[in-house]
Image (tube, rainbow, N blue to C red):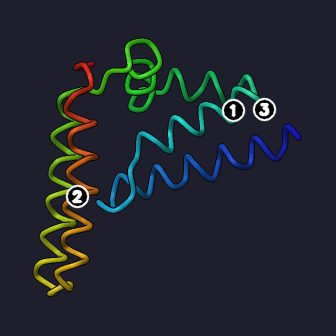
Amino acid sequence: MQYIWAALGLVCVGLALIGIILPLLPTVPFLLLATFFFARSSEHLHTWLLTHRLFGPMINDWQTFGAIRPTAKKAATLSVAAVFGLSVVFSAPSHVLIIQAVVLGCVLVFIWTRPNG
């Protein structure tokens, strides 16, 4: 079972790395999942992720305080705006735009109501 947890953790880290580049994939939720999986599979990988220079502080902020750093909040807001803007540019049907506006609006409300890391 440890190998399955480790494999899932590595997949999540890979998706998080892709999410750094693509605005459609979130980075931090995948890192939090990877932390969960690594905690059940490999102390070495778990420690590596928690002490990582880039990812560690974000994970620690969330685990300790439920907080998101202001720079991450701004990046998420820009990503959400970019995704919605692309939908408008590519003339998505109005019902799709409405659904996107509601879902993305809820995501932004959640993000911006979290404490600052």
Looking at the rendered image, the disc whose residue lies closer to the viewer, 2 or 3, is 2
Viewer-side residue, 104 vs 70: 104
Q: In the structure shown, which secondary structural element does the residue marked by tag 3 occupy?
A: loop
Which amino acid lies under the numbered mark 2 shown in the image of this protein? Val
Crowding near the residue tagged with mark 3, few <14, some 14–19, many ≥20 C-alpha atoms within 10 Å: many
CA gap, disc 2 and disc 1:
34 Å
Q: Quadrant of the C terminus?
A: top left
Return the residue found at the far top: 64
Horizontal and vertical percent position of residue 84 = 17, 67
Which amino acid lies under the numbered mark 1 shown in the image of this protein? Phe
Q: Which image quarter: residue 22?
A: bottom left
Crowding near the residue tagged with mark 1, few <14, some 14–19, many ≥20 C-alpha atoms within 10 Å: many
Looking at the rendered image, the disc whose residue lies closer to the viewer, 2 or 1, is 2
Residue sitting at 21 percent across and 56 percent down? 80
Which residue matches tag 1?
A: 38
Horizontal and vertical percent position of residue 81 = 14, 59
Q: Which mark is residue 65?
A: none
Which amino acid lies under the numbered mark 3 shown in the image of this protein? Ser
Which residue matches tag 3?
A: 41
Q: Is residue 73 above or below residue 58?
A: below
Q: Which image quarter: residue 28?
A: top left
Q: In the structure shown, which secondary structural element does the residue marked by tag 2 occupy?
A: helix
Apparent side of residue 37 relative to residue 101 in the rendered image (left or right):
right
Which residue matches tag 2?
A: 102
Q: Is residue 43 above or below residue 106?
A: above
First in residue order: circle 2 vs circle 1: 1
Determine contact: label 3, label 1, CB under 8 Å: yes
Crowding near the residue tagged with mark 2, few <14, some 14–19, many ≥20 C-alpha atoms within 10 Å: few
Determine contact: label 2, label 3, CB under 8 Å: no
Horizontal and vertical percent position of residue 33 = 57, 39
First in residue order: circle 2 vs circle 3: 3
